[in-house]
Image: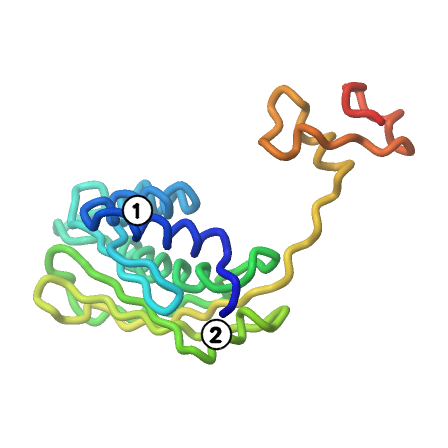
Amino acid sequence: MPKRNRLALAASLIQRLPYPMHEPLLSRLFGSQVHFAGTARVRIQRMSQHEVRMSLANRRRVQNHIKGIHAAAIALLAESASGCVVGMNPPDDKLPLIRTLKVDYLKRAQGNLHATATLSDAQRQAMQEQDRGQVVVEVTILDESREQPIRCEMHWAWIKRCPPSRGVAARVFPARIAPPGIRQLKVPAHICSKVTDKRHCN
């Protein structure tokens, strides 16, 4: 069984809790990583490595001039659902990136929206085994009339993450403000003369 990345592990642990806790905690988890989605109050009902289900309520903050959900907010929901299901699969040393977002608006959205994004077994396997690649993620958006206000294509890619530079990390994050895990880094001796905060020098 492929090893789950940190996002998938966190989602799995949340979904072991009582069911009423799933949506608020999953939504908070995703919103902490994708702040724009959190601002729009995208809600998550299910997160797995095969499927993600999200919703967006027709609130004032996401409405257009005719009191429906704004076109950009509908695209945000589709991008968020596809990005979330993609993000659940690559190992932590790989970085998912959106490549192409194509949206055709078919009709005016009625009320709240629900999104479902899915991946096939072959797509998941490629993300877990290949250092780079791309997939087209299937996303379905339904409104309260159970019709699709948009038709969309989401092309996602993944690449290997660049290894962090110890010297740069220590210079950018002084000890008093450094994130956990970076505070112990030391600046290599050959560039120590260029660092004003000598506490990071070896």
Q: Residue at x 43, y 56 (%)?
A: 8
Q: x%, y% of residue 4? A: 49, 60
**Residue bearing mark 1:** 27
Circles 2, 1 touching at the beta carbon (< 8 Å):
no
Q: Is residue 34 above or below residue 115?
A: above
Q: Which mark is residue 157?
A: none
**Tag 2: residue type?**
Val
Counting residues from the N terminus, which is met first, the one under dot 2 or under dot 1?
1
| Mark 2 residue crowding within 10 angstroms, few (<14) / some (14–19) / many (20+) | some
Q: x%, y% of residue 159? A: 61, 64
Q: Secondary structure at mark 1?
A: helix
Say which quarter of the image contains residue 161.
Answer: bottom right
Q: Secondary structure at mark 2?
A: strand
Q: x%, y% of residue 178? A: 62, 28
Q: In the image shown, does 66 or 176 lie closer to the viewer? A: 176
**Tag 1: residue type?**
Ser
Q: Is residue 105 left or right of residue 176?
A: left
As measured in the structure, the alpha-carbon distance from the residue carrying label 2 to the one carrying label 1 is: 25 Å
**Residue bearing mark 2:** 135
Q: Is residue 129 left or right of residue 199?
A: left
- Residue at the far right in the pictured view: 190
Q: Is residue 93 left or right of residue 28?
A: right
Q: Residue at x 15, y 49 (%)?
A: 58
